[in-house]
Image (spheres, grey):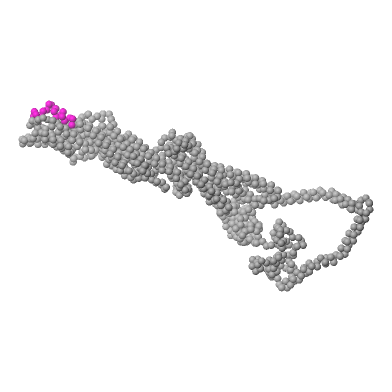
Amino acid sequence: MSHSRPPPLVTGISPKEGPAWTKVTIRGENLGTGPADLIGLSICGHNCLLTAEWMSASKIVCRVGPAKDDKGEIIVTTKSGSLGTSTVSFKLLRPERIGILDQSAVWVDEMNYYDMRTDRNKGLSPLSLRPSNPLGIDLDKGKVSQSDVELIFPGMSGDFTSENFSATWYLIENHSESSFEQLKVGVSNLKKQATKKNEGSLAYVKGGLSTFFEAQDALSAIHQRLESDGTEKVEGSMTQRLENILNRASNTADTLFQEVLGRKDKADSTRNALNVLQRFKFLFNLPLNIERNIQKGDYDVVINDYEKAKSLFGNTEVPVFKKVYGEVETRITALRSLLLDKLLQTPSTLHDQKRYIRYLSDLHAPGDPAWQCIVAQHKWILQLMQSCRDQFISGHRVGVGAALDVEGDSRPSAIGRLGHTASLKRGGSLRTPRPSTWRSETPLQVQFVDKLSDVVIGQLPNFWKLWISYVNGSLFSETGEKSGQVEKSKKNARQRQNDFKKMIEELTSQLVKLVRGALLPATLSQAGLSLYGGWEKQTELSGAWITQIIHTVRSCYEALSALEIPNDLLQGIQDLLLDLRVNCLVVTLLHSAEDIKRLAEKENWMVDNEGITALPSQFEQCVVQMLQSLKEPLEVKVGEINVLQLEQVQDQAAELSVSIMKVFINCLDQLSMKSEGDGSSSHNMSGDLSSPDHFADLTEGFTPTSEQRLLIVLSNCCYLEKHTFLNLMDHFEKHGLTGTEKIARASVDAVRELDRKLFDAYIERRADPIAGSLEPGMYAGYFDWRDCQTPTGVRSYLKEALVNIIAVHAEVFTVSKELVPRVLTKIVESVADEMCRLMQCVSSFSRNGALQARLELCALKDAIAAYLNTDSSSSFKQALDSLPHLHSGSDKKLLEELLNKFTCSMQLQLACFRSSSVQPVKR
């Protein structure tokens, strides 16, 4: 209850003491704004509200009730100021027994008198009256208290009409201050009274003896006259004539005074009626006052007046009062029906519901209005929830807002109200303000869950609070009064606990099924789909939207938990949250795979100093963003379980994570095989070196050749294995995903398989042309090893092969220097194997032929020595072993000179093969 005025303060009361039913005037400050504002008045602990008449904010008139306490404060309670205080007190005087002949300041004409000797309810005859002062001297009331005298004379009485009369008690009570002489006079008076009583009848006869004789003579004369009249047969006896005279006198009197007496009787009747109307005007005006107060909504005044009338006239036998009281009952019955209709009307606030229930209870309405209200609210909330779904399904979203915003457009959203409810145990709003385009951009399922949450959070807390008030009895009394109604309410609540539990379960079940129908239709039965489904035409939600729904459902759960609703009644919402979190995880992983598949469209083939494009970084960023978006769904709130601890979810998440890695690897595979224009491998590589801008174009927008594309993808694969996958596994573990070893192993195996495939394809494209050009160049011009001239240097075919190897080196180095050793080693291995085959195929060598062959083999081996491996070294050894040995010193000298000449002439070209010269390309 909110109070807008200071509490009442009683500063004066007049009179300050008196017996029960004394009319008092109470004065003070802030005694209420009107009769309806006055809700409590107690004097000496007794409730005097029924007799109270509010005069002004500083004056109240009432009658003091028969309180138990002899002295106490005057406490006023108002709606606007609550419980008040008092600076004065009232002393309640106990009523003394009042004799019939005693003077009294209290009107006692309606009191019943009792014969003190027999204690029977019958009036005293005048002959039984006793003098109020039998001693005949002045009464002198002492200061001895009644309780002290009762202790001195137990079982006795100071009333001289009582059988247990004690003279000593009487003297102490009435003549404690009288002198001895006065008491002696009193004894004389008492003796005289006794003598008069004994001789009173005889003395009365002696004093009036002559009167008795005269009366006797008159009666005898009348008797004789009557007898003589009766013996004479004369028409009309004396008694007859006397009767006729009396009748004529009566008729004449009636004629003279009939009109006057009639007017007097009518005036007396009217006067009596006016007196009754004036005395009981409260009752006669009550039906009209009830109607007026009902129209104004002053139900408290109506109830107070009804209680007062019921206590005064409820059991009356007076026909007029019964008729008027019947009219009052008729209007009260109509008021009960009106209040019950208002109570069951929806929507209504919790404050109004409590108010109407209290009114109906005070009016003693039949049945249990509080439970009727609870049942009506339960049905209405169910209808709201189903109506929300039906209107979203039909597409009338505007209607949904109008129909379901039961508290007006100014009502905050469910999450906004949660800031209050959950100041309810949390502070602030949990949802950021939405843009104006939120409705048009948000999927219908998300809008539906949000609106459904608004309905639940807006209605269920008041529904629960209404039940709690019903259980603890605060619906009927917030001040501890009306204990009978409170106990009855508690008893009814205990009997209906199971029924209410079923109501809460039905509401939460309805919420869960409606959300499942919109988001998880596979979890519903066929019958459930017909009631809660119908969302098939809507697009599938992304993980981000499902995350928002999880946030909304969690907020709804937290709001209900803050009301201290038992957890077993909210278990269905927890199960729904678990399924939503698992679904969000799966959908996010699947949608991420689709997003990663489209990364191939963003490849611009621009490499950095490490030989990789932006694609691996974009892939890593995409996966990290995916994991960050899963942070809220995977977060474990109070009462929830960790979905990643479920074995089935672990396996599914690991499988989908591996599929994401393989999708990206497949993207790289598709990029490597993509055909672009003139990306043919049949062109002359040595000719490409003539253009200085050939490899510089890799940093600008260009279309790479198929071989360059293979190299770039190979470089990306290497980076994935060495860096990206390791980083991603760290992120997986940081976000709580399990099975990272399995994911890493499968991902590395897949990327290695792609790497092997792409490497073999590149080597095939580059090594085969170089090795294939050796034999034609070796035998160009019909060269014959058995008939050749003295060697003058390395022939051009070998130089051309070296230039082609240099071109491959330049091509690989431009992309990634890390790939150079691996690629050139394989190229050299292929060339060495071909040279070995060609030399072993020669049947015989002349001296000059053997020297020429050894010169070319040694020149080639020395030039590419940095990239020789075991296989290529073995091939060169086998080729040299197949040649005749040089026995002549001149041949050895010539061989050495020609090798030096070749090295000097090709120094610039062969510089790239020296490992110390491997430097990153500056771009």
Q: Quadrant of the C terminus?
A: top left
Taking the spot 43% from the left edge, 33% from the top edge, the residue there is: 537
The relative height of residue 216 versus residue 734 in the rendered view (above or below) is below
Taking the spot 66% from the left edge, 66% from the top edge, the residue there is: 155
Residue 9, quarter of the rendered image: bottom right
Residue 76 spot, x, y in % from top left: 59, 55
Residue 350 spot, x, y in % from top left: 53, 46
- From which residue to which does the magenta span run? 771-793
Answer with left or right where residue 646 lies relative to residue 784: right
The relative height of residue 443 versus residue 568 in the rendered view (above or below) is above
One can see residue 419 in this view:
no
Secondary structure mostly seen in the magenta stretch: loop
Find out whether residue 784 is within the magenta segment.
yes
Which residue of the protein is positioned furthest toward the top in this rendering?
782
Taking the spot 88% from the left edge, 63% from the top edge, the residue there is: 213
Residue 783 spot, x, y in % from top left: 11, 28
